[in-house]
Amino acid sequence: MNPLFSVVIPLYNKESVIERTIHSVLSQTVEDYEIIVVNDGSTDNSQMIVEKIENLKIKLIVQENQGASAARNRGIESSIGQYIAFLDGDDVWKPNHLFVMRNLINKFPYCGMYATAHNVKLETNKEKFIDFGFEENYEGVVKRYFKHSTHFKKPSNI
């Protein structure tokens, strides 16, 4: 049976953080996923670090550098999950991220895209909650997604 989620991670020169990123996926409270890492022509040791992580959920694809969008598209082409979940090579998820996404899918099965608010780590190592203009625990359909996605203004100290 195919997994519910295909987690697509474009990778370019993230050797200092890619292991942490992948382990944030492997630490999810749900296990219904695959991880597709697309090494987009990294010139550092990123690929070697991914290869050292022994887990059957991880599929590594290697391509010449074409940019993050091309890497994401390549990951989508190789996916077998019902839903695509994007994660950048230098970001991490909290352990319940896919659990929350699965619950949103179950509550709003007719939607075509699902998203959550997130935290941004500041240079001071403090985190700032980014809510896109909604209350912290809002769950519902966003009629004008692109309007709300531009609500976020990156703090000057990031």
Image (tube, grey):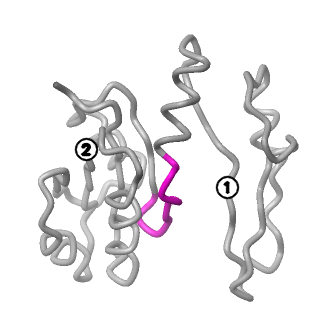
**What residue does disc 1 label?**
118
Tell whether 56 sits left or right of 107: left
Query: Quick check: 63 left or right of 65?
Result: left
**Residue wearing tag 2:** 34
Q: Secondary structure at mark 1?
A: strand
Residue 121, by quadrant, is: bottom right
Q: In this rendering, is residue 84 above or below 16?
A: above
Query: Residue pushed farthest bottom?
Result: 124
Say which quadrant the C terminus sits in.
bottom right
Q: Is residue 120 one of those drawn in magenta?
A: no
Q: Residue at x 27, y 71 (%)?
A: 42
Mark 1 neighbour class, 10 Å CA radius: few under 14, some 14 to 19, many 20 or more: some
- The residue segment tinted magenta is 88-97
Q: Nearer the viewer, residue 53 or 48?
A: 53
State whether the magenta stretch is mostly helix, strand or loop.
loop
Query: How far from the left and from the top, in percent, is residue 131?
Result: 79, 49
Total numbered labels placed on residues in the image: 2
Q: Amino acid at mark 2?
A: Glu
x, y percentage for residue 6?
32, 39
The residue positioned 69% from the left and 85% from the top of the image is 125
Q: Quadrant of residue 120?
A: bottom right
- Label 1 is placed on what type of residue? His
Q: Is residue 78 above or below residue 31?
A: above
> SS at mark 2?
strand
Measure how far apart labels 1 and 2 are at the Cα level. Answer: 22 Å
